Image (cartoon, rainbow, N blue to C red):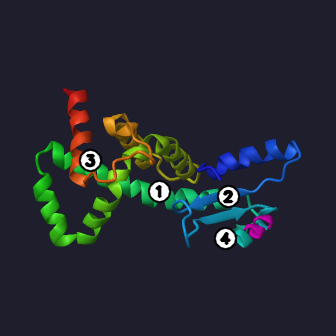
Amino acid sequence: CNAIAPQATLRMEPILTSAGARFVDAGIIGGPPRDGYSPCFYASGEHAGELEELRDFGLDVRVMGDKIGQASGIKMCYAAMTKGSSALYSELLLAAELLGLSDQLKAQFQESQPSVLQRMERGLPGVPAKARRWVSEMQEIEATFADVGLTPYIFRGVTDMYRLIGDSPLGEETPENKDRERSLEETIRVIADSVRDRTG
């Protein structure tokens, strides 16, 4: 269930099956399980159907087919949207902060894109706690897109963005000890200060 490119799962399969293991490609979409909620466990490969037994334990298992790479592929495409948009939001807010335009940009979002502003306020303060871990996942998305003939450069930039966030003081946070009270504005201010310190 690691977040890896489909071609990586295709390389792994013969290694594990030659050792006698049954290989299933799986990708998890969604947050940690909690009362009444389970993330989606997408599965593919010859033995993917065996995971359906886990439904009896409350897991939302969705078998996609018998091809290795299908489950990891949907994980990569979905994460490209969720984590890619968080990187884009982070970068544009950092740019506005560094340009001295944060208040004006926020006012414009409140006027014309209030749902986007709400999404940023709700989600971005928690990003630094995961930014370092997401660097390798963004590299896997980059490889996925390049393998099907699409540009790798968008997610090369996303990788750089999460590396920058992870290098800030907030990158020391973990999901367990992150500051749940910190606002979006303070989050962006701290990261922007680290950019200023680095660039002089």
Q: Secondary structure at mark 3?
A: helix
C-beta proximity under 8 Å, tags 4 and 1: no
Q: Nearer the viewer, residue 3 or 35?
A: 35
Gap between marks 3 and 1, in whole Å? 22 Å
Range of residues picked out in magenta: 50-54
Residue of label 4: 58
First in residue order: circle 1 vs circle 2: 2
State which mark lies toward you, 1 or 2: 2
Specify whether 63 is left or right of 50: left
Gap between marks 4 and 1, in whole Å? 27 Å
Q: Amino acid at mark 2?
A: Ala
Gap between marks 4 and 3, in whole Å? 36 Å
Q: Quadrant of the C terminus?
A: top left
First in residue order: circle 2 vs circle 4: 2
Q: Dot 3, crowdedness within 10 Å: few (<14), some or many (≥20)?
A: many
Q: Secondary structure at mark 1?
A: helix
Magenta stretch: includes residue 86 = no
State which mark lies toward you, 4 or 3: 4
Residue 187's mark? 3
Gap between marks 2 and 4, in whole Å? 17 Å
x, y (%) of residue 180? Answer: 34, 53
State which mark lies toward you, 2 or 4: 4
State which mark lies toward you, 3 or 1: 3
State which mark lies toward you, 3 or 2: 3
Q: Residue at x 28, y 66 (%)?
A: 118
